[in-house]
């Protein structure tokens, strides 16, 4: 059953599908997949090509737009758009601390979540495509992790693609998670240095907050345990176009005077908990490193291990000296599951995923070298989340791929100025630029 409804300039239709949990066993257990169709008002009956959007993450459902916001307005000029909640997110059989115990214990949960990577997401798309397009190929727009999925799509099912557009999401084809994080920490350090250059007063503010947290066991109102390391992870903001400004405004309201002395303000605690909590997207924490896993080598909490190679991020060492506190970002650590009440029941599950050694390959370099699908990718200069050098190396591997390398936007460029970004990339797939 489908239900349609309207927003300004857009007609939306809800679609529900059942797809195999394990596509290698199509007659086995089924899960529900949800997707929202969007078409411009007045074009409901038009024979339009489809564009399917694969969200960044992992772990985030598709955007919930109001009307023709962001890039959607540009897409609706020529496409019927499908906003897919990838499996385990949004309304697609959500996976979280409330639902995962239905699978059994930690071992059963880890086995289940091993089927929530790009390979399964692409096979979901191919499962539902015939029902929507009558078998015709469609265009894919992949943002960030959605670009990882799109690269897998090109590797395994290019016959399903009319064209592919990737924004900030060309992955390393063969790099282990360790390689990803060895490249990431220096980028993050550069972002922190740029932030402190813009807001030099934040050096003292961050130091003061970290010192307070080191001396006081701090539990936020929703139950999040705010350690110094957790505070450092607010640096994830610095990968977005307005992230430095948002971090600055958060830090400037950190303390208030009370009858009992200086304390962290309620406003700071509330906003910090909202920024750090994984309650709305727990899959990000659970399968983030697994997104890079291929073959028999476990990820083994890669970000935590590699961080030890960069002692400048060691908060205890920093607080004993006189250097600025470095923020971190785009990484998940074992202590993340101890701090966040939305993740605490899933710590053992996460450990088992980190130990796993039977990961399927995600990309086929030989097939990509013979690609015939028109592909264009926006590569953001010094992207904090996806390494630029890795992206350009992959771009050289994919036959015919056209890149737009820009420092005009950060990683969220398709959100910040979506119509222009999408228009430029669509033109590149048509060799019109």
Image (cartoon, helix red, strand yellow):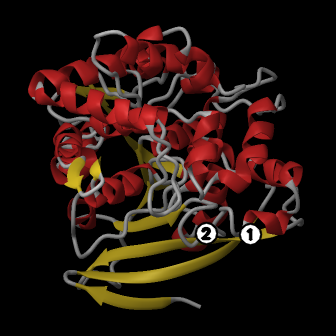
Where residue 48 sits: x, y (%)? 35, 70
Quick check: marks 1 and 2 in contact, CB under 8 Å? yes
- Side of 53 relative to 172 (left or right): left
Q: Which mark is residue 31?
A: 1
Of labels 1 and 2, earlier in sequence is: 1
Q: Is residue 35 visible?
A: yes
- Side of 223 relative to 237 (left or right): right
Where residue 54 sits: x, y (%)? 47, 53
- Side of 30 relative to 121 (left or right): right
Quadrant occupied by the C terminus: top left
Where residue 407 sits: x, y (%)? 18, 26
Is 128 drawn above or below residue 37 in the view shown? above
Quarter of the figure with residue 235 = top left
**Residue neighbourhood size for the residue with mark 2, other residues' Cα within 10 Å, grouped as few (<14), some (14–19), many (≥20):** many
Q: Which mark is residue 92?
A: 2
Where residue 37 sits: x, y (%)? 42, 74
Tell how many labels. 2
| Element on which disc 2 rests | loop
Picture residue at 36% right of the left edge, 39% below the top: 234
Picture residue at 33% right of the left edge, 18% below the top: 189
| Element on which disc 1 rests | strand
Q: Which mark is residue 136?
A: none
Q: Nearer the viewer, residue 287 or 163?
A: 287
Picture residue at 42% right of the left edge, 53% below the top: 139
**Residue neighbourhood size for the residue with mark 1, other residues' Cα within 10 Å, grouped as few (<14), some (14–19), many (≥20):** some
Q: Nearer the viewer, residue 39 or 264?
A: 264
Picture residue at 36% right of the left edge, 74% below the top: 38
Is 158 drawn above or below residue 133 in the view shown? above
């Amino acid at each position: 059953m489908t239900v349609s409804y309207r927003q300004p300039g857009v007609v939306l239709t809800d679609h529900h599908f059942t797809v195999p949990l394990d596509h290698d066993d199509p007659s086995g257990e089924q899960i529900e997949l949800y997707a929202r169709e969007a078409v411009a008002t007045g074009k409901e009956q038009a024979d339009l090509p489809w564009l399917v959007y694969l969200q960044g993450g992992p772990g985030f459902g598709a955007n919930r737009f109001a009307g023709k916001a962001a890039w959607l307005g540009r897409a609706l000029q020529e496409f019927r758009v499908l906003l897919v909640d990838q499996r385990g997110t949004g309304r697609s059989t959500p996976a979280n601390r409330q639902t995962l115990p239905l699978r059994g214990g930690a071992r059963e949960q880890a086995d289940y979540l091993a089927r929530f990577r790009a390979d399964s997401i692409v096979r979901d798309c191919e499962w539902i495509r015939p029902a929507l397009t009558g078998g015709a190929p469609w265009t894919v727009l992949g943002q960030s992790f959605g670009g990882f999925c799109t690269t897998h799509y090109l590797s395994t099912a290019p016959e399903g693609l009319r064209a592919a557009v990737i924004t900030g999401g060309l992955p390393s084809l063969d790099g282990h998670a360790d390689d990803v994080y060895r490249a990431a920490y220096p980028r993050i350090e550069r972002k922190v240095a740029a932030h402190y250059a813009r807001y030099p007063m934040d050096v003292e503010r961050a130091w003061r907050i970290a010192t307070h947290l080191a001396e006081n066991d701090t539990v936020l109102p929703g139950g999040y345990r705010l350690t110094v390391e957790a505070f450092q992870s607010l640096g994830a903001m610095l990968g977005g176009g307005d992230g430095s400004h948002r971090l600055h405004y958060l830090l400037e309201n950190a303390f208030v005077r009370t009858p009992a002395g200086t304390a962290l303000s309620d406003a700071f605690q509330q906003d910090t908990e909202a920024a750090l909590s994984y309650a709305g997207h727990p899959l990000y924490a659970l399968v983030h490193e697994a997104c890079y896993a291929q073959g028999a080598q476990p990820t083994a909490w890669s970000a935590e291990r590699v961080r030890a190679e960069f002692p400048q991020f060691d908060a205890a060492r920093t607080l004993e000296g006189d250097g600025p506190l470095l923020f971190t970002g785009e990484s998940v650590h074992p202590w993340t599951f101890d701090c966040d009440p939305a993740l605490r029941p899933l710590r053992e599950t996460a450990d088992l995923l980190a130990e796993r050694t039977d990961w399927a390959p995600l990309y086929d370099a030989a097939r990509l070298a013979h690609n015939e699908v028109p592909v264009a990718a926006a590569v953001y200069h010094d992207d904090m989340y996806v390494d630029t050098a890795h992206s350009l190396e992959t771009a050289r591997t994919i036959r015919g791929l056209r890149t737009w390398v820009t420092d005009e936007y950060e990683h969220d460029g398709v959100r910040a100025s979506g119509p222009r970004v999408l228009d430029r990339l669509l033109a590149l797939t048509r060799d019109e630029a």
